[in-house]
Amino acid sequence: MLRPPKSPSTSSDLGLIYEIRFDDVPEGQQDVTVDMTLTAQGCPEHVNISAQVKSRVEQLPGVRNANVNVIWEPAWTPERLSPDARKQLGID
């Protein structure tokens, strides 16, 4: 998926993606909505990260449109890290 700035892990490995919804639209395509968060509300890259997620999703075959919602509830915690992200970040 996408690597946030200054991170060796992807946004999904970091547990930033909370939900992905697919809505069927004409011509066999789908609109995709991604609910995600960031590790801190004050992250200066939040606009860029959500725009990159939108762009990547819209590049997938069969996706007509993507919408990315940055949400803050529930708050992100390190428990959301995948085992791979924990290993890459030296958290074990």
Image: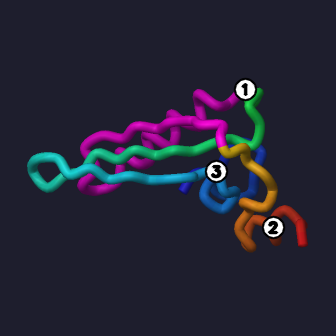
**Could you tell me residue 52's position as x and y percent?**
52, 39
Q: Which residues are magenta?
A: 44-73
* Dot 2: element: helix
Determine which residue is flagged by label 2.
Answer: 86
Give the CA separation, mark 1 to mark 3. Answer: 16 Å
**Could you tell me residue 47's position as x and y percent?**
59, 27
Q: Residues within 10 Å of mark 2 (few under 14, many from 20)?
A: some
Quadrant where the N terminus sits is bottom right
Q: Work out whether mark 1 precedes mark 3 in sequence or the reverse, and give the earlier one.
A: 3
Label 3 amino acid?
Answer: Leu
Q: Is 73 placed above or below 61 here?
A: above
Q: Residues within 10 Å of mark 1 (few under 14, many from 20)?
A: few
Is residue 84 rendered magenta in the image?
A: no
Q: Is 78 placed above or below 56 here?
A: below
Determine which residue is flagged by label 3.
Answer: 16
| Identity of the residue drawn at 81% across and 56% down | 78
* Dot 1: element: loop
* Dot 3: element: loop
Label 1 amino acid?
Answer: Pro
Q: Work out whether mark 2 precedes mark 1 in sequence or the reverse, and give the earlier one.
A: 1
Determine which residue is flagged by label 1.
Answer: 44
User: Which colour style is shown?
Assistant: rainbow
Is residue 59 rendered magenta in the image?
A: yes
